[in-house]
């Protein structure tokens, strides 16, 4: 997965305290290959504080990081407090997403579900139209959600091996525990990795 970090200046944002669902969106209106920087400007014009989506997937499959992953988004009215928003560029009422977009979306969904321990199923990976009356993400992307989920399910095969009989925590829980313990050695390791992962979506496969 090719990830790009566009230069966007973010205003102060609120940290999200729960993450148990991923919402898929499209651009709509016209089949443009919208960038995160363009969408940021559109959303500012609509009086949002900045881009509402956490990720933008371009037609060539490049993933652009939008609103910081830890922040409450602005993409699914009433559901932003517990969801991540992924936007695929294009109008999928008329056009179809590219194979590169479907593959990148599957990989991103797989990584996010692993990191936040979200079940990779149709209940937790939803289209915007599952939450409210909208055509988003367009019928040609909406109908591919089962395919995205199926691919995502095949990406991380590794079952965590219990340590001393306890299940392995995910990286965020582990890092938070290190942080709360104030262990200086651990801060350089777990917490650093936590911050790095949050900022850069490191891929620990
Ligand atoms: Zn939408």
Image (spheres, rainbow, N blue to C red):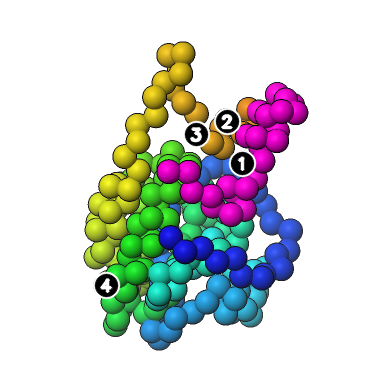
Residues tagged 3 and 1 counted as in contact (Cβ below 8 A) = no
Q: Which residue is mark 1?
A: 194
- Disc nearer the start of the sequence (3/4): 4
For disc 3, the neighbor class at 10 Å (few under 14, some 14 to 19, many from 20) is few
Residues tagged 2 and 3 counted as in contact (Cβ below 8 A) = yes
Q: CA distance from mark 2 to mark 3?
A: 6 Å
130, 110: nearer the viewer: 110
Tell me if residue 41 can be seen: yes
Residues tagged 4 and 2 counted as in contact (Cβ below 8 A) = no
Q: CA distance from mark 1 to mark 4?
A: 36 Å
Tell me, yes or no, whether the highlighted magenta stretch contains residue 12. no
Residue 15 in the image, given as x and y percentages of width and height: 65, 48
Task: Indicate the quadrant where residue 11 lies.
Answer: bottom right
For disc 1, the neighbor class at 10 Å (few under 14, some 14 to 19, many from 20) is many
Please name the residue shown 70% across and 35% down the image.
188
> Which element carries disc 3, helix, strand or loop?
loop
Tell me if residue 134 can be seen: no
Q: Which residue is mark 4?
A: 140
Numbered badge on residue 170: 3
Q: How many numbered marks are there?
A: 4
Q: Is 6 located above or below residue 19 in the figure?
A: below
Quadrant of the drawing holding the N terminus: bottom left
- Disc nearer the start of the sequence (4/2): 4
Q: CA distance from mark 3 to mark 4?
A: 34 Å
**Dot in front, 3 or 4:** 3
Numbered badge on residue 174: 2
């Amino acid at each position: 997965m090719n990830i790009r970090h566009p230069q966007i200046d973010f205003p102060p944002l609120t940290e999200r305290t729960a993450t148990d669902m991923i919402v898929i969106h499209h651009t709509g209106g016209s089949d443009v290959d919208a960038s995160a920087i363009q969408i940021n400007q559109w959303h500012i014009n609509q009086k949002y504080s900045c881009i509402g989506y956490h990720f933008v997937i371009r037609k060539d499959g490049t993933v652009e990081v939008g609103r910081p992953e830890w922040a409450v988004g602005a993409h699914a009215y009433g559901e932003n407090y517990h969801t991540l928003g992924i936007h695929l560029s294009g109008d999928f009422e008329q056009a179809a997403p590219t194979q590169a977009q479907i593959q990148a979306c599957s990989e991103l969904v797989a990584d996010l579900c692993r990191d936040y321990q979200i079940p990779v199923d149709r209940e937790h990976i939803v289209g915007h139209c599952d939450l409210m009356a909208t055509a988003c993400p367009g019928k040609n992307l909406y109908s591919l959600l089962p395919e995205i989920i199926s691919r995502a399910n095949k990406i991380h095969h590794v079952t965590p091996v219990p340590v001393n009989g306890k299940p392995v925590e995910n990286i965020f829980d582990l890092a938070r525990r290190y942080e709360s313990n104030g262990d200086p050695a651990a801060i350089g390791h777990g917490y650093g990795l936590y911050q790095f992962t949050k900022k850069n979506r490191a891929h620990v496969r």
